[in-house]
Image (cartoon, helix red, strand yellow):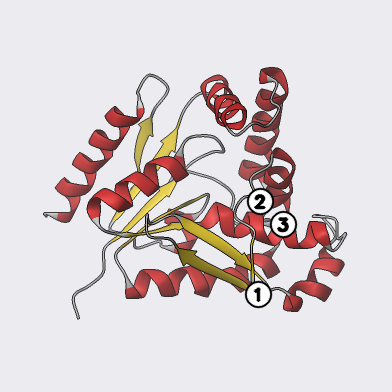
Amino acid sequence: MAKKISIAIDGPAGAGKSTIARRLAKELGYYYVDTGAIYRTVAYFFDLWGVAPKDIDGITRYIDELTIGIEYDEDGVQHMIMNGMDVTDDIRTPDISQKASLVSAHAVVRDMLLDMQRDVAKEHDVIMDGRDIGTVVLPKATVKIFLTASPEVRARRRCDELLAKGQKAKYEQVLADIQKRDYQDTHREVAPLKMCRDSVKVDTSDMDIEQVIAHIKDIIEKKVSK
């Protein structure tokens, strides 16, 4: 069996990883794995159970009650299934985003999900995005991209996204949330967000989505063709 191609896209919150990775996967014919959504699902589960994201005892006690599945619709959109329920829309809130960052810092959570993520990459050509894909989940990925943008640009994009979904959003609060999330992600003890030495940094602050897609496709094509 031919070796599978894996594309790791890491970067801070609001950098557009999910949007870019989903588009690339569709155009290249790869599986798209949104690991951020997986951790959001874990955070949502514990939120429903009333377990605080820093309560390691509670998380350890109840984590075996959680089952997570990933399904794809006909458009290739990833749906998160939590204990048989589709929670794809429920996990996309600023509150769950913050809690996901805290929950994902626990080794017991990351260990539970690590094999699940790696197994997908063993069976399919994948584009996987998150915070530690290139450093921890897929350290031997075919291509590693570090996607970023200034906090201000990311906050504006996130505001636009939330408003488009009919949710309330204030730029100053969204910016503060992103800066807080950046600090949490880069300072946690387990698998902190950092750029690999062999990653290609792509700053999208002054690029539109079509320019980003074209640029990353060029990086992938050059790397895969070697």
Which residue is label 1 attached to?
Answer: 67
Any part of residue 197 in sight: no
Answer left or right for 78 relative to 6: right
Residue 43 numbered tag: 3
The amino acid marked with disc number 1 is Thr
Which residue is label 2 attached to?
Answer: 91
Any part of residue 174 in sight: yes
The amino acid marked with disc number 2 is Ile
Answer left or right for 132 relative to 121: right
**Residue 176 position in % (x across, y down):** 71, 25
Name the foreground residue: 97 vs 223.
97
Q: CA distance from mark 1 to mark 3?
A: 13 Å
Circle 3 — which element? helix
Image quadrant occupied by the C terminus? bottom left
**Residue 144 position in % (x across, y down):** 34, 50
Q: Quadrant of residue 39?
A: bottom right
Q: Residues within 10 Å of mark 2 (few under 14, many from 20)?
A: many
Report the residue at 37% width, 54% height from top: 75
Check contact, mark 2 vs mark 3: CB within 8 A.
Answer: yes
Mark 2 or mark 3: which is in front? 2
73 lies above or below 4? above
Report the residue at 72% width, 57% height from top: 43
Image quadrant occupied by the N terminus? bottom left
Q: CA distance from mark 2 to mark 3?
A: 8 Å
